[in-house]
Image (cartoon, rainbow, N blue to C red):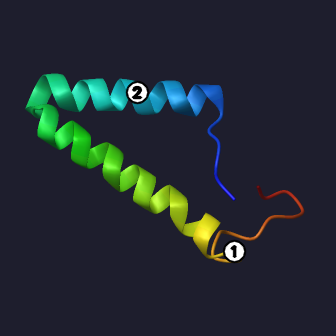
Amino acid sequence: MSFTLHPGAERDLGEAARFYREEVGRGIAERFLDEFERVAALPVANPGLEIPTGGDRR
């Protein structure tokens, strides 16, 4: 199993990474993206860890 990002979220992630690269350097931008991928993979590896859905929550 894997995860996908909404196109808007993917765009926001890219903009954030560019901001970090331009403002504080490439290394921080790479660490930011690595941490995003680590956290995004948690619910994939641990089903049920994510916030429950249903009703008016998503």
Q: Quadrant of the N terminus?
A: bottom right
**Residue at figure coordinates x 56%, y 33% from the top left:** 9
Report the residue that reaches farthest toward the right.
55
Task: In the rendered view, tell whether residue 29 sits above or below residue 47.
Answer: above
Q: Quadrant of the C terminus?
A: bottom right
Query: Residue 7 in the image: x percent, y percent?
Result: 63, 26
Answer left or right for 10 relative to 6: left
Task: In the rendered view, tell whether residue 25 sits above or below residue 33.
Answer: above
Which picture quadrant has residue 29?
top left
What's under tag 1, amino acid-wise? Pro
What's under tag 2, amino acid-wise? Gly
**Residue at figure coordinates x 65%, y 34% from the top left:** 6
Answer left or right for 34 relative to 19: right
The reply to whether dot 1 and dot 2 touch (C-beta < 8 Å) is: no
**How busy is the neighbourhood of tag 2: few (under 14 within 10 Å), some, or many (20 plus)?**
some
Task: In the rendered view, tell whether residue 40 sits above or below residue 11.
Answer: below
Q: Which mark, residue 14?
A: 2
Pick the residue in front: 9 or 4.
4
**How busy is the neighbourhood of tag 1: few (under 14 within 10 Å), some, or many (20 plus)?**
few
Query: Residue 15 in the image: x percent, y percent?
Result: 37, 24
**Residue at figure coordinates x 65%, y 69% from the top left:** 50
The residue that label 1 is drawn on is: 47
